[in-house]
Amino acid sequence: MKTAERYSGILEWFKTNMPLPETELVYSDPFQLIVAVILSAQCTDKRVNMITPALFARYPDAFSMAKATQEDIFGLIKSCSYPNNKAKHLLGMAEMIVNRFNGKVPSTHEELTMLPGVGRKTANVIASVVWNSPVIAVDTHVFRVARRLGLTPGARNPLEVELRLTREIPEELRPKAHHWLLLHGRYTCTARKPGCQECGLKQWCAWYASQTGK
């Protein structure tokens, strides 16, 4: 199967079967989203959504969080993975937003990645979810699913996967594509035991074809 045919079939399936994909993180504004995304690194969205209500009640914006101590933040997020590092990043991020960006989450990729705890993936999540920017964030789910489906042959790391997906997926679909691949990886194409039998994409999937000879 040619790569173009694979992309066409998979994107059409997602448009029909998952027309309005959304992040499962609960937030009310860009600042709360960036906090939630930082917390979600190597942690489930379900766990993050259990942590953030108390965190946002205490620190609803960058101004209030910037006045906190790292220990205060740690106490509210200690049930997530790597709470020490994340508390440090959250405090530094809030302080920079206040001191450098007048309390508003910046909108450019370059500015977002200046913030402590915000790497390329996190910046792409914020840009695509908040501003509908034509970028694709590659997390572990997106990386795995894109490679299994055969969308990114030869890609060896998240950046190479991102660049290939960006090249092949139309701009208007890129913000959705991140969530399509992520949610598919979270609930169907799981790491240890992919649900191939109930998967609507198996007719285009390179991994399924290699396993079954179909």
Image (tube, rainbow, N blue to C red):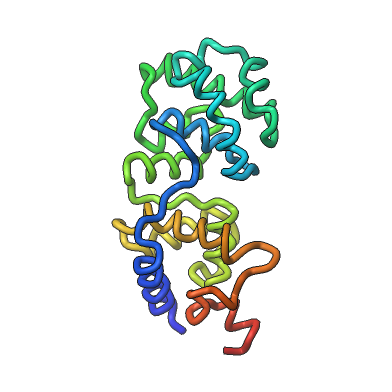
Which corner quadrant of the image does residue 186 belong to? bottom right
Question: At x 70% / y 64%, what residue is drawn?
Answer: 192
Question: At x 36% / y 23%, what residue is drawn?
Answer: 104
Task: Please tell me whether residue 161 is drawn above or below residue 119 in the rendered image.
Answer: below
- Residue 210: percent from the left, percent from the top? 62, 82
Task: Please tell me whether residue 75 is drawn above or below residue 132 in the rendered image.
Answer: above
- Residue 90: percent from the left, percent from the top? 56, 25
Q: Quadrant of the C terminus?
A: bottom right
- Residue 91: percent from the left, percent from the top? 56, 20
Task: Please tell me whether residue 44 is drawn above or below residue 199 in the rendered image.
Answer: above
- Residue 43: percent from the left, percent from the top? 64, 42
| Residue extending farthest top | 67
Question: At x 61% / y 12%, what residue is drawn?
Answer: 69
Question: At x 36% / y 35%, what residue is drawn?
Answer: 108
Left or right: 45, with 12 as reference point = right
Which corner quadrant of the image does residue 70 belong to? top right
Q: How many marks are shown on the rendered structure?
A: 0
| Residue extending farthest left | 172
